[in-house]
Image (cartoon, coloured by chain):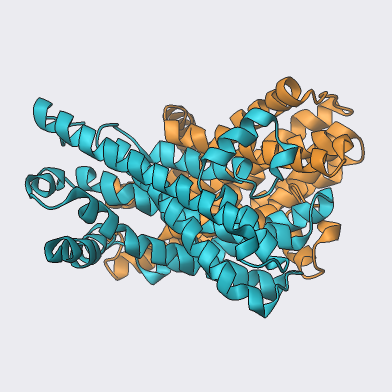
Amino acid sequence: MSGLRVFLVGLRFHVKALTHSVFFLLTSVFMPLLVATVAYYMYKAGNQPGSLLYVSLGAAVYGIWSSTLFGSGGAIQWQRWQGTLEVLVSAPTPFVLVIAPLTLATSVIGIYSLASTLVWGRLVFGIPFHVVHWLAFVVAVPATILGLGLLGFVFASTFVLYRNANALSNMLEWPVLLVTGMLVPLSLLPGWAGPIAWLLAPTWGVQAIREAALGGTPWPDVGMTIVLGLLYLAIGAVCLRHFEIAARRHATLSLT
Amino acid sequence: MRAFLRVFFVGGVIAYRGLFNWIRPAMYIPTMLIGPVFQILFFAYLGRYSKVEDDAFFVVGNAIQASAMSAVFAGTMTIANERQYQTLAPLLATPANRFAMFMGRSVPVIASGVLVSAWGFLMGRLLLDFDPPASSLPALAVIVVVSVTSCTAFGLTLGSIGMRARDVFMSANIAYYLMWLLCGVNIPLSALPGWLAQIGRLLPLTHGIAAGREVAAGASLSSVSGLVWTEVAVGTAWAMVAMTLVWWFEREGRRRATLETF
């Protein structure tokens, strides 16, 4: 019970702290708006205006992904810079309950990107926002946030040993955006991209949100997003424990 | 003249090494080389799906624009980081020529930008449907160098604002990403509203990318000389703005004793 309390308090604290970060809001609001705008104009120039809501929803999930990635890259690094990493590691609270709320908070902030992208599309490009399955949509959004946040947790856990985590997270932004079908359908990508996409929660999350909004069968995708999220939690917890011990043993915990 | 050249070249290299001593292969390769490859792939596939242009359009646009990561961010840091590192006052206490001092340190930035761009073209050739004639490569190289230099001048302008502003890196981020939209990187300027296209024409890269596309399609350098000279003019204008701002902010910073206050 106290573990749940630590998790929830941590989540609340980080959501509030990140909301005060202008740079973080830039990542979660400005970037998806820009990507959505570029995609809108590309679709219009290619005479495919019927797909604009499809773009809006994809760009919104990209916003969640972008802020998650930025946050997971910084989760360990920020603690290093602030000199709090050793304190957190040496506390009796399991480290997983300290880091997981932070990475999940970064994806919760992505809700701003969802809202701003849909409002931007409606106001600037006149894209109507009609949701076919409201219940599924309302469930799919938090499920996607959970899946992405826990994927970020896996990255953050491996970054304990990696001093240039931010560089790695910068690198991962485009590949995941490409192979998860957020803006480009998977059918257009080479065959080898398929199995990679299936292992990534954003693939199922964006599919769930789209099928809920545009019509289809969103529930299997929602289920896959949650299952993958739980799998990431297990992998992340094991990695975090393993890498934390390795970093303590080699005295590299606070090296930047 | 000798002192000018010494400050320009020797001072430039030393300053670059000092300001960017944190760059390691483990940081440079993922950020500057691998990231841009996926940027090119993403927009090329998005272009295929939206049926707006062919692969060559996106390879040229994004390979040249990827150089802006070096040009804009490093260009900004070459000036703004002196203030961040609290070395601006000793630097400006020297009588060294300001143009040689700040332009000299941009040469390694330009070299890095050209490397990133060349890498983007190579990957575009290997991974996508992009096959420019071999005879176009020298002209393409000239255009890339001109475009990166012009963009670095833009980065220096942002960096000079960092002599006064509290946080210039936010502006650098916004400027860098807006280039996707405004500089004809992924959208033909004709598809943008007039006012957005007009802003794009005032920014670096726009004319260089347009020239690069024509050359990659087989045109000669002389046939795109108008675009190349326009890119040179845009870069020169931004360099003049940068040096004017450096002069202005140095003067104001000395007068108010606020060179390194935040």
Q: Point out residue A101 in the picture as x, y percentages from the top left corner.
A: 49, 40
Residue A253 locus on image (x, y percent): 31, 60
Say if residue B59 shows up in the picture: no
Task: Tell me where residue A62 appears, x and y as whole percent.
Answer: 65, 43
Looking at the image, which is closer to me, A176 or B262? B262
Chain B tint in image? cyan
Q: Colour of chain A?
A: orange
B1 or A208, which is in the foreground? B1
Q: Residue furthest right?
A: A216
| Identity of the residue furthest to the bottom in this view | B134
Q: Where B194 sits versus A244, above or below?
A: above
Nearest the viewer among A25 and B20 is: B20
Residue plotted at (60% across, 52% down): A151
The answer to which image quadrant residue B27 occupies is bottom left
Q: Is the residue A146 above or below the residue B30 in the image?
A: above
Nearer to us in this view, B101 or A138: B101
Q: Residue at x 23, y 51 (%)?
A: B99
Q: Quadrant of residue A197?
A: bottom right
On screen, B12 above or below B195?
below
- A158 sits left or right of B190 in the view: left
Q: Which residue does the image show at 81% across and 33% down from the upper left?
A: A53
Looking at the figure, which quarter contains the C terminus of chain A? Answer: bottom left
